[in-house]
Image: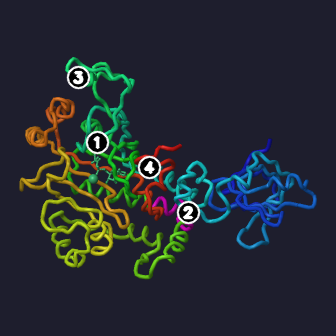
Amino acid sequence: MSQRTKIKALLQSQQTEIDVTVKGWVRAFRSNRFIALNDGSTNNNIQIVVDFENTDPALLKRITVGAALSVQGKLIASLGKGQTVEVVANEIEILGDCDPETYPIQPKKHSLEFLRENAHLRFRTSTFGAIFRLRNSLAFAVHRFFQERGFVYLHTPIITASDAEGAGETFHVTNFDLNNIPKTDTGEIDFKQDFFGRPTNLTVSGQLEGELGAMALSDIYTFGPTFRAENSNTTRHLAEFWMIEPEVAFNDLVDNMDLAEDMLKYVIKYALDKNADDIEFLTQRLLEEEKTKPQNERSEMTLTEKLQFCLNNDFERLTYTEAIEILKESTPNKKKKFVYPVEGWGTDLQSEHERYLVEKHFKKPVILTDYPKEIKAFYMRQNDDGKTVRAMDILFPGIGEIVGGSQREERLDKLEQRMHEMGIPTQELWWYLDTRRFGSCPHAGFGLGFERLVLFVTGMGNIRDVIPFPRFPKNAEF
Ligand code: 4AD
Ligand code: MG
């Protein structure tokens, strides 16, 4: 059997008049003569020219959209428009038929909702091919960025007994028979009899364990799935998402911001270089979509311009307190256009506020620091003002929060005191507190929501479209 050549390589081939074997799925078949074949290596199809006069009509009939084919033929320079090369078929083998009557993916524009319901087949569309090739490149770029800087990739546990963010949004892990849960004499669930002998859950973050690694390896990062049972049915939330969490010993908040900004720019640049075709395709897709919107709601920049803009500008850095002042004085606030009016200091920012700052006020990515301690997790380093902590959130246009991080509280007494205030049991986190007992040092880290990054780079509007099989309330299909 001759070797298969991927379509991406064929389309770039400098050589013609060579024998090739190409395999893929039919995207279109017109005039019983021209097959557009795609194998996912690129968004572009290769044109297969069929000698229909000398081809068995029964075979021709089986060349339908979605069918899997193996084609042997000659690669030649193409005279047709839109391609430089094409394959003149010698032999076509149908590897898998595809019934055009029942195949859901027709050669026409499908709605994203429809494709979400057919997520098992949506990879076969140009849009989703581009999205998932980009997702792959971004994941690789994340590893490359950290590896080039000597970070250690640390695998933190997926099953844990802690709720790092303290938000109580965990999924329980148990192997109890749910119809017959063992109870204690006093009628409570007897977790001693459960698999781990204690209540456990899926992790919401690898940070706490990541910190343990950083306290010896200095620079670590995690990149794994995290799980949150928050009932946010939004275009920005998933119940299962991937997070990248670097943690660096001896870094302070400014180092942390520099690292995050460098990383974001690095991976976006990588995607722009590596997946230029896919980004160009998605840019055109977005332009078409924009045309359906009223003039004043259209984006000022194309997707490519937005990505370039992000690379070429410093992120705006300011404190939460400064941001509140800007929001209070803002036109939408004064005109009562915000769903959540900004009145005083101390409340959490809503996505409408974050997006106002990024999209209207600064018109570029923004890093907000020094949030009120009441709205942030227990582990953040306390400022001397007694009110704020060394937190940082990075806000992106169209997305809102993409990164959340902080300098960590490295002082044992301060950390314990904050845990007491927040009702977090110190005994259970004895291992975490040990790092503060034995050679504690300043350190900082952050979490990047990987799907939010993919959303930004692909210009898509719904996070459910940038992970292959989204998990969200009332949905765990596939
Ligand atoms: O801000 P978060 O909750 O921070 C942490 O979990 C810290 N432990 C990170 C750290 O300092 N190591 O989450 C970090 C990021 C958010 O900024 C957001 O991009 C993403 O994770 N995120 C979600 N993405 C999709 N769906 C959800 N439900 C998400 N919740 C958070
Ligand atoms: Mg956050």
Q: Which of 178 and 75 is in front in this view?
A: 178
Q: Within 8 Å of ligand 1, the CB of disc 4?
A: no
> Which residue is the site of mark 4?
144
Looking at the image, residue 375 lies above or below residue 432: below
Task: Give the Cα distance between marks 2 and 3.
Answer: 51 Å
Magenta segment includes 431: no
Q: Residue furthest bottom?
A: 295
Q: Residue 207 carries which label?
A: 1
Instruction: Please name the residue shown 46% across and 49% down the image.
Output: 470
Identified at 9% across, 55% down, the residue is 387
| Coordinates of residue 251 in the picture (x, y in percent) | 23, 49
Q: What stretch is highlighted in magenta?
A: 269-281
Viewer-side label of 2, 1: 2
The type of residue carrying mark 3 is Gly
Ligand 1 is within 8 Å of the C-beta of the residue at disc 1: yes
Residue 110, image x, y percentages: 59, 62
Query: Taking 189 as reference, is 290 above or below it?
Result: below
Question: Badge 4: how crowded within 10 Å, few (<14), some, or many (20+)?
Answer: some
Q: In this view, does 64 lie above or below 332?
A: above
Q: Earlier in the sequence, mark 3 or mark 4?
A: 4
Q: Mark 2 points at which residue?
A: 111
Q: Earlier in the sequence, mark 4 or mark 2?
A: 2
State which mark lies toward you, 2 or 3.
3
Could you tell which of marks 3 and 1 lies nearer the N-terminus?
A: 3
Residue behind mark 3: 187
- The alpha-carbon separation of the residues under discs 4 and 2 comes to 35 Å
